[in-house]
Image: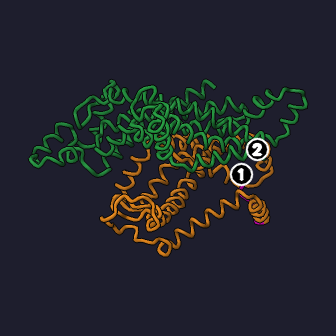
Chain colours: A green, B orange
């Protein structure tokens, strides 16, 4: 186990390194020059001046040299400065990261409590009107686009009832975007939980557990839920990763100052240092979740082996 | 973000031969939910196929005289800021949506399923390499993949579909990877392997 973990962390670091390299290559492949985009409006800048700015930013050097300089700085904890506005990149990302984390964590709580409960109960009471109602709700949840759900929630709770603010980044502002994301993901999780649990409920070992005289609660939690858990945990991990990469639509609807909006903006402005910084941080998230999932598989189902 | 659930259902319902396919379809059509779903899908495909006959207006024809109209008998869904008929735009849009759904899902499910299955079955350095490259791809985010695809292949609808397809490969690979790990522990996947047949079957 420890050896596996060490190997896994090592390959994770390697993955992050490859990602930084690939992303540097990729963003230089994408047409569009940051300097040109930045000075597109001003007529008075001459081509010579643009060349000078490029030289100043080091953009005229060969790409491997740029990457070398970049990596050297990263290892010293310096993420560089933005091309537009010349601000340091790291604080820019670190201000938004807690916002994104907060939104993600809150909506995950909603997703797990609503989605897993609903799906589990629907499977347990299969074929009843509980099942039908919950699954219809899940179907609606999957079909409704998040920007629309967000706008409707905003209309009801902010405009009509006036209970919650429309947008911003405070704690009270958190409720609506978290609800939007949480419910949308909960719908998926509910369906997945139901189908996983239906498979488990048909197994003999549950009858054995009941025949042994185990209480229903213990049968359900230890014997039933745990055996359907891998699919659910897997999906939750993916949803978490997606949201940490920025729930861009919801962030935009609610003007939530998250990392996703910054990322999109920097991609369209070809702000290389910001894109690189964002992808680096996101790669750390992706790799961490990936390792966590692989370890969780082992914990949930000890029969699983990696070889 | 909408996350389609297809692979798990697909994997469980894959019929190994035709007789089972027939039985599977019979069971499917007895369920009222499946009937309703099939009906909705048929209507959607019909609308997409016969879009020119259904849409009352040209979807891209602008009409400056009546921008942002509410729904009315003349314009069922109202008009947009350029005075274009929204119902006609939705009807024509269904073609695009179906195509994106089919093509992009085709790419991501085929490749994602294949990579996840291979990695989970083989494990070892091949499995690790496959899943770690999925992590790299996942880290790129959709927007960057879309821009890069357009940069390499040029801007077009087909390339946009490819971009959407590529960016969701890691999602399906991960789902499949986890599901196969669980299936591998069951005695049913051990027996046929020992008794000889091709493990991929």
Q: Report whether B66 appears left or right of B170.
A: left
Q: Report whether B142 appears left or right of B14.
A: left
Region in magenta? B13-18
Residue located 29% across and 44% down the image: A270
B22 lies above or below A126: below
Residue located 32% across and 50% down the image: A30
Q: Residue A48 placed where, x, y %?
A: 10, 46
Residue, disc 1: B12
Query: Does residue A307 appear in the picture of this structure?
Result: no
Q: Is residue B16 magenta?
A: yes
Query: What's the CA distance linking mark 1 and mark 2?
Result: 10 Å
Q: Residue A50 placed where, x, y %?
A: 14, 45
Residue located 32% across and 36% down the image: A274
Q: Report whether A144 appears left or right of A88.
A: right
Q: State if disc 2 and disc 1 touch (CB < 8 Å).
A: yes
**How many residues crowd around disc 1 within 10 Å: few (fewer than 14), some, or many (20 or more)?**
few
Residue located 40% across and 71% down the image: B58
Q: The C terminus of chain B is located in which quarter?
A: bottom right
Q: Residue A1 placed where, x, y %?
A: 64, 26
- Disc number for residue A199: 2
């Amino acid at each position: 186990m420890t050896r596996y973990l060490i190997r896994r962390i090592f390959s994770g670091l390697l993955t992050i390194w490859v990602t930084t390299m690939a992303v540097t290559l990729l963003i230089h492949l994408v047409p569009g020059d940051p300097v040109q985009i930045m000075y597109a409006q001003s007529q008075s800048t001459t081509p010579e001046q643009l060349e000078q700015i490029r030289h100043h930013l080091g953009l005229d050097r060969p790409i491997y040299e740029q990457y070398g300089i970049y990596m050297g700085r990263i290892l010293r904890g310096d993420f560089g400065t933005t091309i537009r506005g010349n601000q340091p990149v790291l604080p820019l990302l670190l201000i938004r990261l807690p916002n994104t984390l907060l939104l993600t964590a809150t909506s995950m709580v909603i997703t797990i409590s609503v989605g897993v409960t609903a799906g589990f109960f629907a499977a347990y009471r299969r074929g009843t009107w509980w099942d039908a109602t919950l699954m219809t709700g899940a179907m609606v949840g999957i079909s409704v686009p998040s920007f629309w759900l967000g706008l409707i929630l905003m209309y009801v709770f902010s405009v009509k009832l006036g209970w919650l603010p429309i947008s911003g980044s405070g704690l009270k502002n958190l409720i609506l975007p978290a609800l939007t994301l949480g419910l949308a993901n909960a719908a998926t999780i509910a369906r997945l939980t139901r189908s996983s649990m239906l498979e488990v409920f048909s197994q003999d070992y549950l009858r054995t557990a009941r025949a042994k005289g185990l209480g229903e609660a213990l049968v359900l939690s230890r014997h039933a839920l745990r055996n359907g858990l891998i699919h659910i945990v897997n999906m939750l991990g993916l949803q978490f990763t997606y949201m940490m990469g920025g729930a861009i639509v919801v962030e935009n609807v609610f003007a939530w100052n998250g990392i996703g909006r910054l990322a999109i903006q920097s991609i369209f402005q070809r702000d290389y240092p910001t894109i690189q910084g964002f992808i680096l941080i996101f790669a750390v998230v992706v790799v961490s979740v990936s390792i966590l999932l692989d370890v969780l598989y082992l914990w949930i189902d000890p029969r699983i082996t990696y070889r | 973000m909408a996350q389609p659930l297809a692979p798990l259902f697909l994997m469980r319902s894959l019929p190994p031969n035709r007789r089972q396919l027939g039985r599977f379809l019979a069971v499917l059509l007895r369920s009222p939910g499946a009937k309703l779903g099939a009906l909705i899908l048929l209507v959607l495909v019909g609308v997409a196929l016969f879009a020119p006959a259904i849409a009352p207006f040209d979807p891209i024809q602008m009409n400056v005289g009546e921008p942002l109209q509410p729904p009315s008998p003349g314009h069922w869904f109202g008009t947009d800021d350029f005075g274009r008929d929204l119902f006609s735009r939705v009807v024509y849009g269904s073609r695009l949506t179906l195509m994106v759904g089919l093509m992009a899902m085709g790419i991501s499910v085929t490749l994602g399923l294949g990579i996840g299955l291979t990695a989970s079955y083989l494990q070892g350095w091949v499995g690790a390499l496959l899943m770690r490259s999925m992590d790299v791809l996942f880290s790129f985010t959709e927007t960057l993949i879309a821009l890069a695809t357009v940069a390499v292949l040029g801007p077009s609808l087909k390339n946009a579909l490819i971009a959407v397809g590529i960016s969701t490969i890691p999602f399906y690979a991960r789902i499949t990877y986890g599901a196969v790990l669980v299936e591998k522990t069951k005695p049913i996947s051990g027996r046929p392997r020992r008794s000889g047949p091709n493990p991929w079957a």
